[in-house]
Image (cartoon, rainbow, N blue to C red):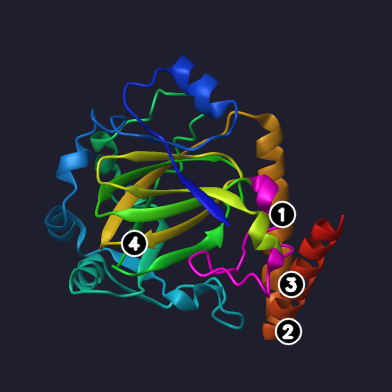
Amino acid sequence: MKLKQIDRREGLTRESFANEYLSSLTPVVFTDLMDPWAAKDKWSVEFFKSKYGHLKVPVFSANYSKPGKGYMVPDKTMTFREFLSTLESGPTDLRMFLFNIFRHAPELCDDFSTHTIMDGFIKQFPFMFFGGEGSHVALHYDIDMSHVFLNQIHGRKRVVLFSQEQSRNLYRHPYTVASYIDVNNPDYEKYPALKLVEGYEVMLQPGETLFIPSGHWHYIEYTDFGYSISLRSSDSVLRKVKGMYNIATHYVVDKGMNKLMGPKWRELKATLAKKRAEELIEA
């Protein structure tokens, strides 16, 4: 497995971004895309605690992807203030993601704006992600196949990316957008196709925006307690159709079979993933 650093760029125009990165689905870090946002400096931990600490939020742990009754459901619900205090207190695997705080606090939308670096942004789906130091997001790609602009507000994240073409080599589980290989300690004996994998990595800093192209696999480590906001863009009808297909099949089939089979369904997916990767190596 080979990883190279993602470009960091300042002053990219729509044209240069389209030609150098968007057209080839190549990730890039913008160092100045968030500069006009009030959120960049305004959204401190104390700001969220004092203004929105009373909100009830869904909290997830590392159990999120484990098969069984708790598969893809929150561990618990707590107040936003309690959650933030827990993250501040030290390393924890607790995270909160895909939480649309803007439905509860629409005035926050005044603190940021849709990027103008490309067209097709989906304005009704801004999401925030929070995580404790040491927590991580397992390797996956986004089911709706949108481009993602991950805007880091607080703390640092290490992000590792792989293109969609690497899916078989990454042992993607069928009917999911997930892989369970260890990005940091790849087991080449158990998963020999990982030797063929090439990707990107970056340490995303506060105030930076990472462009994650459509279908790109991403693994994320919270180096510090931190949070970000993602904006999504879909500039292709074909990608929208693919995303709808994924949602209609992967999500329904995977969750349904998990309820019926539990851990045995996970084992079956792992077996099929390994078989597909081996067929690719032998081809």
- In what quadrant of the picture does the C terminus appear? bottom right
Please name the residue that numbered disc 4 is placed on: 222
Mark 3 vs 2, N-terminal side = 2
Give above or below for 26 relative to 257.
above
Please name the residue that numbered disc 1 is placed on: 248
In magenta segment, residue 178: yes
Give above or below for 220 relative to 93.
above
Image marks 2 and 4: residues in contact by CB distance under 8 Å: no
Q: Residue at x 74, y 66 (%)?
A: 253
Count of labels in the image: 4
Query: What is the spatial separation of the Cα atoms under label 1 and label 2, in whole angstroms?
Result: 22 Å
Query: What is the spatial separation of the Cα atoms under label 4 and label 1, in whole angstroms?
Result: 31 Å
Mark 2 vs 4, N-terminal side = 4
Query: What is the spatial separation of the Cα atoms under label 2 and label 4, in whole angstroms?
Result: 31 Å
Q: Which residues are magenta?
A: 164-192
Q: Residue furthest top?
A: 15
Q: Residue at x 49, y 38 (%)?
A: 27
Q: Position of residue 91 (x, y in %)?
A: 27, 74
From the image, give the main secondary structure of the stretch colored magenta: loop
Of 13 and 195, the residue lying toward us: 195
Residue 278 falls in which quadrant of the image?
bottom right
Q: Residue at x 14, y 53 (%)?
A: 47
Mark 1 vs 2, N-terminal side = 1
Image marks 1 and 3: residues in contact by CB distance under 8 Å: no
